[in-house]
Image (cartoon, rainbow, N blue to C red):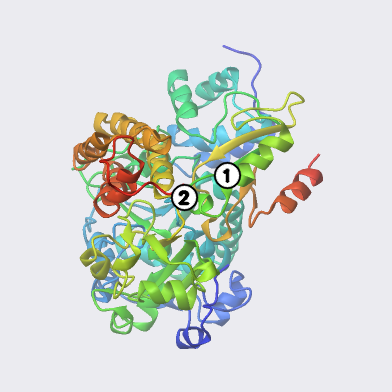
Amino acid sequence: MRTVSIFTDDNLKKIEELRSRYPTAQALVLPVLWIVQREHGYISEEAMKDVAELLQVPFGHILGVVTFYTMFHDKPMGRHHVEVCTNVSCLLRGSDKVLAHLEKRLGIKAGQTTPDRKWTLSETECMGSCGTAPMFAIGDEYYENLTIEKIDRILDSLQ
Amino acid sequence: MILRPVDSEKNSAWTRLIVPDTPDLHKLEVYRAHGGYEGLRKALGMKPEEVIDEVKKSNLRGRGGACFPTGLKWSFMPKQSAKPKYLCVNGDESEPGTFKDRQIFELNPHQLLEGILIGCYAMGITTAYVYIRGEYGKWITMLERALAVAYANGLVGKSILGTEFTTDIVIHKGAGAYICGEESSLMNSIEGLRGYPRVKPPFPAQFGLWGCPTTINNVETMTNIPLIIQRGWEWYSKIGAPKHPGPILVGVSGHVSNPGVFEMPTGEPLLEIIHKWAGGVPGNKRIKAVIPGGSSTMILRGEQLEGVRMDADSLKAAGSSVGTAGLIVMDEETDLIRVITRIAKFYYHESCGQCTPCREGTGWMWKILTRFEQGEGTMKDIDLLMDVANNIEGNTICALGDAAAWPVQSMIRRFREEFELRAVDRPSGSREAAA
């Protein structure tokens, strides 16, 4: 039994509240993983073990869930995770130029993190911004109707 | 944001019902001042089966892509059940070209909540889960706020509007998986599992969430419900196309001057949507191709569009489908090989991996298409690609396999010349490929 848990007291309180919303503990897997990732930025193997113990669900099951869903990260990400949509509607409106400019400015390719760990750059699938393309998202924030100038301003504002 | 059509005549002809042109409608007091929750009040004075009947007679068809009659789906639920019954509201909105449900979360969340409550009452459901894609964090917060206000005002929870009707609504955040928009995968995701679709039968109304009777409906579909109850099935059934009535949120993207979501009655001609609502193609370029209803629907040639309307029957007759009404417009300079390769990559990424035809087949389609993109495809590859697509279609646990096959099949059938022009061994005497 591990003595150190990754859950803060506030987290634990929140999780207890959530239990009443579902008939099984297993249904809490996604909500609890979100709480962990919001708190720690990613979901480590240790964290997965804590989640497994808290919900009384096998560790392998938690690992299976974390590796299935693209928004769950099992490794630390850069402080700003820039996710560029390159699916059809964004492609038709210049997403390749957006990605190329970001790769140039950040000095990394899609899928990489800068050495100072400030930026991670990724390509994503459709984010639901097809009418305001091209776009990228950083966390919950959507940056839409992008131009090269806008991209530069956004990056400059985020340090 | 819901756009106004570029043609002002179109603007004045249609009063919006799903996302009305009312400022601050997301606020409860504004929503109520415009008749909000009166549909719920009326429904609570009807028998549950009368509510289902009203929805049936309205001929409302699902807005999530499959276009299934909503009243019929609701009638599949058992009237009596030893197990609790559930409603899942599908807000996973991940179909490329689709960005409409997001507008409802932002602009008219209470009409969605009201529709959910009416549905729960009609089917005897005590908990509804609204599954929203994880990327929509901001919109989840918007709906959470509206839900909290609704709870605080006795509209959700115990003794709704002072009656015996009690139901809870839970917002459940997804974590990045297109497949979780498939109804059985969505249920597995709520249960805390990997998003694998289930083999059907059994169907959700018999064996759904935690083995209990469950109905799954799209966000936009549910937002239509209060209108039907408040103003009656007959009024609703007369809006737009007779066999596919009602207001519909059409998303227009790609090569148009005024891209965005427009609300219109079903049955609008595609060319009018493109030219009169979305401002036409920049530079007046010719329309080479459109995808009418999200990337899973079959591609159409620009020349085919005359007379084709945004409704289920018209698009079926044209050799495609209405899907999510996510219209993607491609002009004459579009590299369609690049487009179809990117679409194939999407399905390859998003395949859950459960069944071999999809898991392997989507990868093979992407690999063959990549060969064409890199100028290494052959004439034989075209037939090979069609063969792979044909062997995925109909052979999978869920519709993602079909959704991956259809764009490829339709691209080959309707734009074969694009492939042939790129083939390294194209027959001599044919035109040289454009640079």
Q: Earlier in the sequence, mark 1 or mark 2?
A: 2
| Left/right of residue B411 with respect to residue B28 in the rendered view | left
B139 above or below B7?
above
Label 2 CA crowd tier, 10 Å (few <14, some 14–19, many 20+): many
B8 above or below B383?
below
Q: Residue at x 50, y 22 (%)?
A: A52
Front position among marks 1 and 2: 1
A82 above or below B240?
above
> Mark number for residue A88?
2
Amino acid on which the number 1 mark rests in the picture:
Asp
Q: Which of B38 and B192 is in front in this view?
A: B192
Q: Do we see residue B239 in this rendering?
A: yes
Q: Do we see residue B159 in this rendering?
A: no
Q: Residue B398 at x, y = what percent?
A: 27, 42
The residue to which callout 1 is attached is A96
- Quarter of the image for residue B151 reads bottom right
Label 1 CA crowd tier, 10 Å (few <14, some 14–19, many 20+): some
- Cβ–Cβ under 8 Å for marks 1 and 2: no
Q: Which residue is drawn at 39% across and 73% down?
A: B271
Amino acid on which the number 2 mark rests in the picture:
Val
> Mark number for residue B144?
none
Q: Residue B59 at x, y = what percent?
A: 26, 72
